[in-house]
Amino acid sequence: MKTPTRHCSVRLDQAHYDRLIAIAAERGCKPSDVIRTAVHVFLTSANLLTASHRRIARICEFQQLALDIIIREQFPEYRDRIIAETDKRLEQYHGA
């Protein structure tokens, strides 16, 4: 059984349109097939990207918490120096 579809109009600039036509010709399909595939890949990867960002954020938070605990308990005399150096690097490399 075929999945129901909905109509959607898309406007492309000339360069994207020409590239779309060329890709469809190379693949021997319609431009609409290329667009459907591109939308499917984008929407699928958006979910993976979100999951990946959450994973990276969790790892970063874990590392920050673990290092903070280690520094507070084992090297409290270095904490202020580390924070000062972090602020210095933020300014130097990120302008913040």
Image (tube, rainbow, N blue to C red):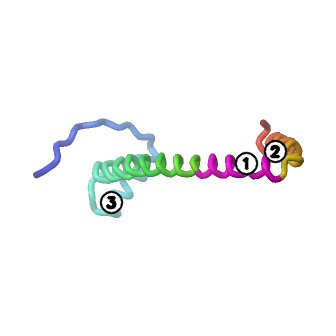
Pinpoint residue 29: horizontal percent, then vertical percent.
Answer: 27, 58
- The Cα–Cα distance between marks 2 and 1, rounded to whole angstroms, is 17 Å
Instruction: Identify the residue at image location x=35%, y=63%.
Output: 26
- Quarter holding residue 91: top right
- Mark 2, residues whose alpha carbon is within 10 Å: few (<14), some, or many (≥20)? few
Label 2 sits on residue: 86
**Magenta stretch bounds:** 59-74
Which type of secondary structure does the marked residue at label 3 adopt?
helix
Instruction: Identify the residue at image location x=38%, y=37%.
Output: 11
Residue 55, numbered circle: none
- The Cα–Cα distance between marks 2 and 3, rounded to whole angstroms, is 53 Å
Label 3 sits on residue: 25
6 or 49: nearer the eye? 49
Image quarter where the C terminus lies is: top right
Q: Which of marks 2 and 3 is nearer the N terminus?
A: 3
Dot 3 amino acid type: Ala
User: Would residue 30 be found to the left or right of residue 18 on screen?
Assistant: left
Instruction: Identify the residue at image location x=62%, y=50%.
Output: 62
Pinpoint residue 92: horizontal percent, then vertical percent.
Answer: 84, 44
Which type of secondary structure does the marked residue at label 2 adopt?
helix
Label 1 sits on residue: 69
Q: Is 60 covered by the magenta stretch?
A: yes
Q: Is 15 covered by the magenta stretch?
A: no
| In this view, the mark in front (2 or 1) | 1
- Mark 3, residues whose alpha carbon is within 10 Å: few (<14), some, or many (≥20)? few
Which residue extends farthest front? 73
Pinpoint residue 15: horizontal percent, then vertical percent.
Answer: 47, 47
User: Would residue 3 be found to the left or right of residue 43 on screen?
Assistant: left
